[in-house]
Image: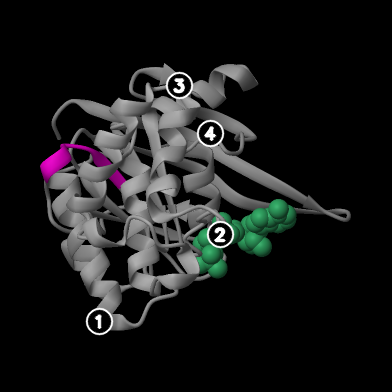
Amino acid sequence: MGEELVRVEAVGRDYRSGDRVVHALQEVSFSAGRGELVAVRGRSGAGKTTLLNLIGGLDRPTSGRIQVAGLEMTSAGSRELVELRRSKIGFVFQSFGLIPILSAAENVGVPLRLVKRPRAEREERVAMLLELVGLGAQAAQRPYELSGGQQQRVALARALANDPPLLIADEPTGQLDSETGREIMDLLRALVRSQGMTALVATHDPSLIELADRVLTLRDGRLLAGEEAGGSGAAPVAAAAG
Ligand SMILES: Nc1ncnc2c1ncn2[C@@H]1O[C@H](COP(=O)(O)OP(=O)(O)OP(=O)(O)O)[C@@H](O)[C@H]1O
């Protein structure tokens, strides 16, 4: 593993549901290096979304620590966490999450507006990003005028807008047919390579798992040891692996 970008140490997340406690994650530890594409697989309910939401700062763990780019997510205040998310993390979701009344270009420009980049610079970067995902000609179209695969391309371009070191994608091909899903995965793989970013991708999709540098498997909220494919080697954090 090269320089470490993500460090997850003994992370647990409990949910209360009535008088029951669901241990969605227990004692999860691993790290991911810069430039790595890490797939997170596991059955429905295994804890994939919970894990990605914690690493992305959308939720807080019940126990353990998470660092992204050397910054402690777990002790960050809410404002700090918002800043961290905006500057360090790009998100892609199964349901695309585009704003319906905005054009493709305006959707891609949203993260740039949030960090108050000047207009000319925004426009230039948005055009470059749409070209990068093969949608240079669709800049003015609204999400409902685009296919599912095209919408996910817009979402990918938006996730890259602020050039974040970390991309988090939760079932990015889940709503796409297998051929389109494969195209999106190939694109994601190529973008991770060309932009040098780290990607954590939750998926059931075997073609996506094949493209990963490493695979983490969750079962009932725990990370299984010794099932890592690829081999560029995101090591479990030994001290915390418990
Ligand atoms: N807000 C919540 N309240 C209570 N339980 C929850 C909540 N969110 C998740 N869970 C439970 O935590 C466990 C892990 O859920 P999670 O969504 O992380 O799994 P997943 O692997 O992403 O599943 P899927 O592939 O279906 O998206 C499940 O048992 C789920 O029911």
- For the record, the magenta segment spans 194-199
Quarter placement of the N terminus: top left
Relative to 226, say whether 63 is above or below: above
Quarter of the figure with residue 17: bottom right
Nearest to the eye among marks 3 and 1: give it: 3
Mark 1: give few (<14), some (14-19) or many (20+) Cα within 10 Å.
few
Mark 1: amino acid: Glu
Q: Which residue is mark 4?
A: 57
Label 2 amino acid?
Pro
Kindly identify which residue carries mark 2: 100
Q: CA distance from mark 3 to mark 1?
A: 37 Å
Inter-mark Cα distance, 2 to 3: 22 Å
The alpha-carbon separation of the residues under discs 3 and 4 comes to: 21 Å
Specify which label sits upstream in the sequence, 2 or 3: 2
Say whether residue 236 is left or right of residue 111.
left
Q: Which quadrant of the figure contains the C terminus?
A: top left
Q: Nearer the viewer, residue 50 or 129?
A: 129
Above or below, comparing residue 51 to residue 219 in the picture = above
Q: Amino acid at mark 4?
A: Gly
Q: Is residue 142 left or right of residue 35?
A: right
Q: Earlier in the sequence, mark 4 or mark 2?
A: 4
Which mark is on residue 179?
1
**Ligand 1 within 8 Å of the CB at mark 4:** no
Q: Nearer the viewer, residue 115 or 199?
A: 115
Q: Tell me: residue 87, above or below residue 166.
A: above
Q: Mark 3 or mark 1: name the one nearer the start of the chain.
A: 3
Which color scheme is applied? one colour
User: Of the numbered discs in the image, which one, if any, rests on residue 116?
Assistant: 3
